[in-house]
Image (spheres, rainbow, N blue to C red):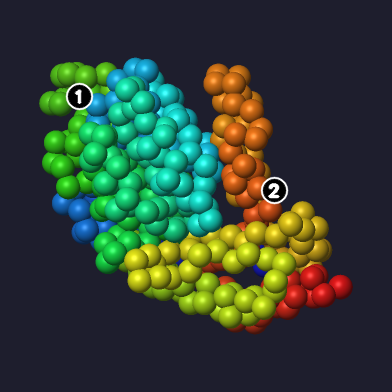
Amino acid sequence: METIPPANPVFTKEMEEAAINALRNEHYILGESVDKFEEEFAKYIGTKYAASVSSGTNALHLALLAAGLNAGEEVVTVATSYIATSNSILHANGTPTFCDINDEYLIDINQIPGKISKKTRGIMPVDLYGHPADMDEINEIAEKNNLFVIEDCAQSHGAVYRGKKTGSLSLMGCFSFYSTKNMTVCGDGGMVTTDDEKLAEKIKLLRNHGQHPKDVHTVLGYTARLNTVNAAIGRVQLKYLPKWIEERRQIAKKYYKLLDDVEEITLPPGDSDIKKPSYHLFEIKTEKRDELLKYLRDNKIICLIHYPTPIPYQPLYKKMFGFKEGMFPKSEEFAVQSMDLPMFPGLKDEQIKYISEKVHKFFSR
C-alpha cells in the first residue's frame, strides 16, 4: 500500500489552461475572472452577492468592518477553531468572547446568552470540519439581542442546513480557498457572501484601499484583492465542487459503516434531517489519539491533528486576556483526543478499507 495522504488538492489541465488564459488575456488584478467567480459562487451558495478577497482571514476581517464593529466591541465565538477566526476580531479592533464546544464540536449555543454583555455586537459561529452550526438558534439569540451574525464557513463549502447552503444563513458568510479546503484557488483566497448589496460593495471598497472611483479614497482600506489567475482557477474548481462534496459524503458513509463497531473511538456527527455536512475533515476522538496517530503513520496512513491547542490557550491569548486551562473543558478534551482520517475526493475503496482495518487492528492488539 502506498502512503495515503491526509488530503490531495486537485489541479488539472483544465485549471492550468484557465490560469494561463487569465494571465495572457486579463488584468492581473480585478480582471474579468474575478467578477465571474463572484457571480458564480453567489449563485452556488444561494445569495444575491459575493465579494472575493485575498484570504479567508481577510473575509472575516472585512466582514466585521463592513458590519460596523467598533473598537472595543465584543464578538462571541468558539474556543475550538483555527486561530484566524478570533484573530479577525482582533484585526477589526474588537474583542473575542469565547464559548466552549458542544458534543458536535461546534459552538455551544447554551453558553452564548451568558457571554453577551453591553459591549457585545455580534456572534461568529464556525462550521467546523464542514458541519453546520445551529444557525436557527444562533440567529434567534442574535435577533433578541440586536446582534449581527457572521458565519465562518472556511471549512463548509457545500454543507447544507435546513435545505440552504452555509454562507446563506446569516448577515454574511466567509469562505476560505486555502489549498486543503473543499475547493481551492491554488493559493490564498477568500469570499464573503451576502444578500445585502451595500455590504458587498463595502467589502469591495475595503479590499481595494477604500477607493471608488479610482484615486478617490473614502474609507481606510486594505490590500486584500483576489488575484485574477486565482479566480480563474477557482471558477473551474467550483464547477466540480458538487461532485467532490458528494464524493466526500460517500467516503464518510463508508467510514461510518466500517468503524461503527470500534467502541474506543467517537465518530463525527453524520447527516440528519436538519444538517448535511460537507466533510472537509473526518474527525474522530479517542483517548489513545497519539498512539493511534503514530501507529497509522507507521502503516503509511498520514493523519493530522486539528487543533492541538484551543484558541484561548494560545500564548497570545493568555498574554492578552489571561485565559487559563480549565476554562473550556470540552475544547481541552477535544484538543487531546481528536484527529482526522484521510478525507479527499479520489480516496479509493481499498484505501478506506485499509485504513479501517488498521484502526481495528490497533484497538484489538
Does residue 261 lie above or below 19 as drawn? below
Q: Is residue 166 visible?
A: yes
User: Where does label 2 land, which residue?
Assistant: 336
Q: Which residue is mark 1?
A: 211
Viewer-side residue, 309 vs 287: 287
Name the amino acid type tagged 1.
Gln
Q: Is residue 288 above or below residue 208?
A: below
Q: Quadrant of the C terminus?
A: bottom right
- Answer few, some or many: residues within 10 Å of disc 2's Cα (few below 14, many 20 plus, some between 14 and 19): many
* x, y percent for residue 229: 35, 48
Could you say where residue 148 lies in the image, as x and y percent from the top left? 26, 36
Q: Position of residue 360 (x, y in %)?
A: 75, 75
Q: Amino acid at mark 2?
A: Val
Q: Secondary structure at mark 1?
A: loop
- Residue 57 seen by the camera: no
Quarter of the figure with residue 201: top left
Which quadrant of the figure contains the N terminus? bottom right
